Image (spheres, rainbow, N blue to C red):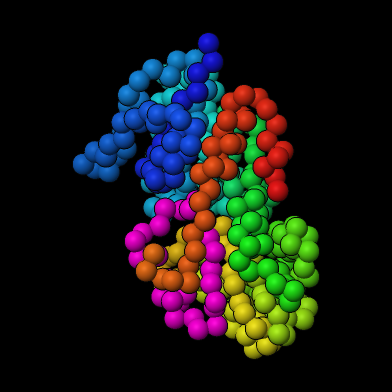
Amino acid sequence: MKRLVLVSGSSCPDLASRIARTMGVDLVDAGLERFANGEIYCEISSSVRGADVFVIQSLTRPVNDNLMELLILIDALKRASADSITVVMPHYGYSRQDRKANPRSPITAKLVADLLTTAGATRVITMELHTGQIQGFFNIPFDNLYSSIVFLPYLEKELLRPNTICVSPDAGGVERVRRCANKLRCEIAMINKRRTGKNQAQAINIVGDVEGKNCILIDDIVDTAGTLMEAIKVLANEGAQEIHVCATHPVFSPPALERIKNCAELSSIIVTDTVALGPEVAEIDKIKVLPTHKIFAKAIELTYNHDSINALFL
């Protein structure tokens, strides 16, 4: 008899609880503990034999701890005879290490894929990968949900004006921006930048006309916000009327929040809850957090019933 089971790691308990409530399903206690030496232990609280299990865990800070916790959860479920184990990973950590950027550097996004598959994952569901080719690192089914399904209703209602233009922070994000711009029926522009170091980039110039425009800068991740500040500065210097930012994954490593708070040129930044956020975020008025639990709940439901999730690829 088919049975759906939801299990949550410790990285995004609030999001997991909202997904469970939306689906009318109880979360199974993973029994996670830490030994004195930092080792992770887990003992699933109830039987999952023959069940289709969905493990909800976002690879956010501390990334390595959350990744190891996820691998241990998958192994425990596999050894408990779960019929299938789908990893629901709102934010795919290490996704920016998707190629050999230097002669002796790793492709860590591929390593994470290998670890998840070897541990026993049978499917992965995530949102807004840094680069789409990461899906090819897996030999199991992989669903990458677009965050535009979350952002577009808000943008259309709150920010869309006749002079709106969607802006890509770099060449790699143009396809993501074009997808949103087509839905909003507006023009696009691109910031030409060069990478100067880890978490550092210098914006050089803009391809497109942003003077007097309502700019919506669309990106997948805000980490330290250094690159974001560079982009905002260039847009402001080119005469942008308003500057709004849409970023799926608000990693917000220090000093991101301080930079956002003190940036006078930034009108607002819209993010999702794929990353668990602290109370300090609510104190910054220009940050708007949009919920993703309904999208993930629908994806889980459709996957469990072996139905197409094509309707979620907005």
Magenta residues (range): 257-281
Residue in view at x 67 percent, y 42 percent: 312
Examine the rendered structure and indicate whether residue 232 appears above or below residue 115: below
Residue in view at x 51 percent, y 51 percent: 291
Percent coordinates x, y for residue 297 in the rendering: 54, 37
- Residue furthest out toward the front: 157
Image quadrant of residue 212? bottom right
Q: Does 71 lie within the magenta span?
A: no
Looking at the picture, tell me which residue is in the foreground, 10 or 98.
Answer: 10
Q: Is residue 59 left or right of residue 153?
A: left
Image quadrant of residue 243? bottom right
Mark count:
0
Residue in view at x 52 percent, y 27 percent: 85
- Residue furthest out toward the top: 1
Q: Is residue 152 left or right of residue 83?
A: right
Residue in view at x 40 percent, y 65 percent: 281
Q: Does 263 lie within the magenta span?
A: yes
Q: Can residue 274 be seen?
A: yes
Examine the rendered structure and indicate whether residue 85 appears above or below residue 138: above
Image quadrant of residue 57? top left
Percent coordinates x, y for residue 301 in the rendering: 57, 30
Percent coordinates x, y for residue 225 in the rendering: 51, 71
Q: Can residue 102 be seen?
A: no
Percent coordinates x, y for residue 209 in the rendering: 77, 81
